[in-house]
Image (cartoon, rainbow, N blue to C red):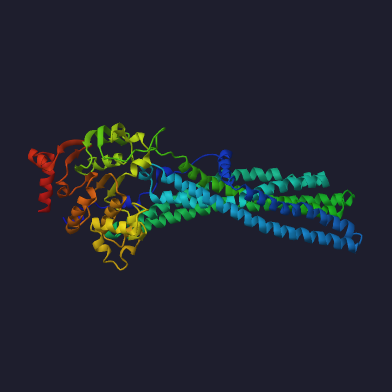
């Protein structure tokens, strides 16, 4: 059987499996006023814009409430009596009102857009800042695409609500109150007969609201899954191409895409009836108005002008009703997104500064693990009774098979997780009693999967110390021999690299991460499989650079290449989350135990 045939190959079931994640399940909650109140609180930092926008709406409100009455008066006093001068006066007043309406509308649109965009900007900033402060378990259990949907798509879906919905709904409510008051003051009989259809409209509309909200929840859910699949698919494109699974991947994406389209259209189908429902109800109200109005007009109870004015007011009654229906649809969409946003904002990090935590003084590098135990989740034991000590300046190597617990030790030391048992001390201080920032700022970590940001090589190295000069950056690169390949590039240190450093080899990316670590000048250095993907020549260069990098620092080296840790002061051999052997290379080889077998097996493999 060939090598390709014996490789672990993703099954069709894996490729077609639904991308359903814990935090992407539909949230089934009823409409909550407290949720909308929380959303509205994001407008409070902008009282000036709110007041100005509300004042601008008063111009629109004035036209809505005054214009129909003036039209009625024009008919009854000017047109009926053929008073040309009165007609000109009323016409001038009406023209002025509509000019005021145009100016007020333009100003209101400008202000509400300003308000909406600032609220969205603030909400997105808060969400991103909060997500950055969450613990590692949050990111371990969620795909990057799902998180991106929350920060981008879900926040953007609130834009219409903040830009138009809130201010417009307040304006429409005042309009309704004013119109109803004027209608009853003109003729209470006509008011009752024309508004009798309103309760029926509300009964029908309420039956739609639950289904509308659920359908928009499903839209957000499916969009989140598409984004998660896209993010994973792009990152794993080489694996897809290696196994020639483009067609299966495309079929799965198309099925998700079709499902999203059907769900979106279904949500639209439930939302569309709001407008026609208002129109039909308005038409019935108008029909009742003219049917009963003609009867009152015939009996001399009302005038033609009053009937025309009443018809205009009735139109001004149904317009805000329709707009409030649209706003309610926006609220239902916003509810589906805001629940997801607040679910993230309400997620508390597991790793936080304790009350009274103080910055740790400059670290000397004395590290001690005391009977440390850890479980990632209930029933999944990762470490058991791990104890060891590293003196300042020592290099401690951790070896063992994959899953033995080596990287878990490093994650605990960087306090990405807290031990479930025991203590970890640095210079005699429990690391859970000091502030996170002061701890991590003095610990450097170089991982096997090196992350390179979009930008120049200079910027990527300087990420370890933003205050470093160009000369400092170049000195750090020379220390690990990264300058050799950097200076051969067309633009040298100012060469632009793409996201994740795709223009660089794996070894070159790791050399940059070494230079970044040197520039940060940490007192404790963690190298987690940092030389696993480097060729023999580059590894030789790095071994020389490590002499500079490790000088005066306490270093922890996790490596499968046992040749890279021969000179370590102490080697810890892990198996099943426990330390099964410890000592230097010579001692462990003389014992002929677990470490000896690892070295022998590696030599047989290389031979």
Q: State the residue at coordinates (29%, 59%).
A: 474
Q: Quadrant of residue 365?
A: top left
Q: Is residue 398 above or below residue 460?
A: above
Front-most of residues 267 and 425 = 425
Left or right of 236, for residue 334: right
Q: Which residue occupies 36% across, 41% down?
A: 438
Is there any visible trace of residue 324 in the rendered image? no
- Return the residue nearer the eye: 350 or 549: 549
Coordinates of residue 229 in the picture (x, y in percent): 38, 53
Judged left or right of residue 496, residue 112 is right
Residue 571, horizontal then vertical, whole percent: 17, 41
Q: Is residue 501 left or right of residue 323?
A: left
Q: How many marks overall?
A: 0
From the viewer's perspective, is residue 431 above or below residue 149?
above
Residue 501 pos. (x, y %): 32, 59
123 relative position to 324: left or right: left
Residue 377: x and y in percent read 33, 36
Q: Is residue 374 visible?
A: yes
Picture residue at 47% right of the left edge, 42% below the top: 345
């Amino acid at each position: 059987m060939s090598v390709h045939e014996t490789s672990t190959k993703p099954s069709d079931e894996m490729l077609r499996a639904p991308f359903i994640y814990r935090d992407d399940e539909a949230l089934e909650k009823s409409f909550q006023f407290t949720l909308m109140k929380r959303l509205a609180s994001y407008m409070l930092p902008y009282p000036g814009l709110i007041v100005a926008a509300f004042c601008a709406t008063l111009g629109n409100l004035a036209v809505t409430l005054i214009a129909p009455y003036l039209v009625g008066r024009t008919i009854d006093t000017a047109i009926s009596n053929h008073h040309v001068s009165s007609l000109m006066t009323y016409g001038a007043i009406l023209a002025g009102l509509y000019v005021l309406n145009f100016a007020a509308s333009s100003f209101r649109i400008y202000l509400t857009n300003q308000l909406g965009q600032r609220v969205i900007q603030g909400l997105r900033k808060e969400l991103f800042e909060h997500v950055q402060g969450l613990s590692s378990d949050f990111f371990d259990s969620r795909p990057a695409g799902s998180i991106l949907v929350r920060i981008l798509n879900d926040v953007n879906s609130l834009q219409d609500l903040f830009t138009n919905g809130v201010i417009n709904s307040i304006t429409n409510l005042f309009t309704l109150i004013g119109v109803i008051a004027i209608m009853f003051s003109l003729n209470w009989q006509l008011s009752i007969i024309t508004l009798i259809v309103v309760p029926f409209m509300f009964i029908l509309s309420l039956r739609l609201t639950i289904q509308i909200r659920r359908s928009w929840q499903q839209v957000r859910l499916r969009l989140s899954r598409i984004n998660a699949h896209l993010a994973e698919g792009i990152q794993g494109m080489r694996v897809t191409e290696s196994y020639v699974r483009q067609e299966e991947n495309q079929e799965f994406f198309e099925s998700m895409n079709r499902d999203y389209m059907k769900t979106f259209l279904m949500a639209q189908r439930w939302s569309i009836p709001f407008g026609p429902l208002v129109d039909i109800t308005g038409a019935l109200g108008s029909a009742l108005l003219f049917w009963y109005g003609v009867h009152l007009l015939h009996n001399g109870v009302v005038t033609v002008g009053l009937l025309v004015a009443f018809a205009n007011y009735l139109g001004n009654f149904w317009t805000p009703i329709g707009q409030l229906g649209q706003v309610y649809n926006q609220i239902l969409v916003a509810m589906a997104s805001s629940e997801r946003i607040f679910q993230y904002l309400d997620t508390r990090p597991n790793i936080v500064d304790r009350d009274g935590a103080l910055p740790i003084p400059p670290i000397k590098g004395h590290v001690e693990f005391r009977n440390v135990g850890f479980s990632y989740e209930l029933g999944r034991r990762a470490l058991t009774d791990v104890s060891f000590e590293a003196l300042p300046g020592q290099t401690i190597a951790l070896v063992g098979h994959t899953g033995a617990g080596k990287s878990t030790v490093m994650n605990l030391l960087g306090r990405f997780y807290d031990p479930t048992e025991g203590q970890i001390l640095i210079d005699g201080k429990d690391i859970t009693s000091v502030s996170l920032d002061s701890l991590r700022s003095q610990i450097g970590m170089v991982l096997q999967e090196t992350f390179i940001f979009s930008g120049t090589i200079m910027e990527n190295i300087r990420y370890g110390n933003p205050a470093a000069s160009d000369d400092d950056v170049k000195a750090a690169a020379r220390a690990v021999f990264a300058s050799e390949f950097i200076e051969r590039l067309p633009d040298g240190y100012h060469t632009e690299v793409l996201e994740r450093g795709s223009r660089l080899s794996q070894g070159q990316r790791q050399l940059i991460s070494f230079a970044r670590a040197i520039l940060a000048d940490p007192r404790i250095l963690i190298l987690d499989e940092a030389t696993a993907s480097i060729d023999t020549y580059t590894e030789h260069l790095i071994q020389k650079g490590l002499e500079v990098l490790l000088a005066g620092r306490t270093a922890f080296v996790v490596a499968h290449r046992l040749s890279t840790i021969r000179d370590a002061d102490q080697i810890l051999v892990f198996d099943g989350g426990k330390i099964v052997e410890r000592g230097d290379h010579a001692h462990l080889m003389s014992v002929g135990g677990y470490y000896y077998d690892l070295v022998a097996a590696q030599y047989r493999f290389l031979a």
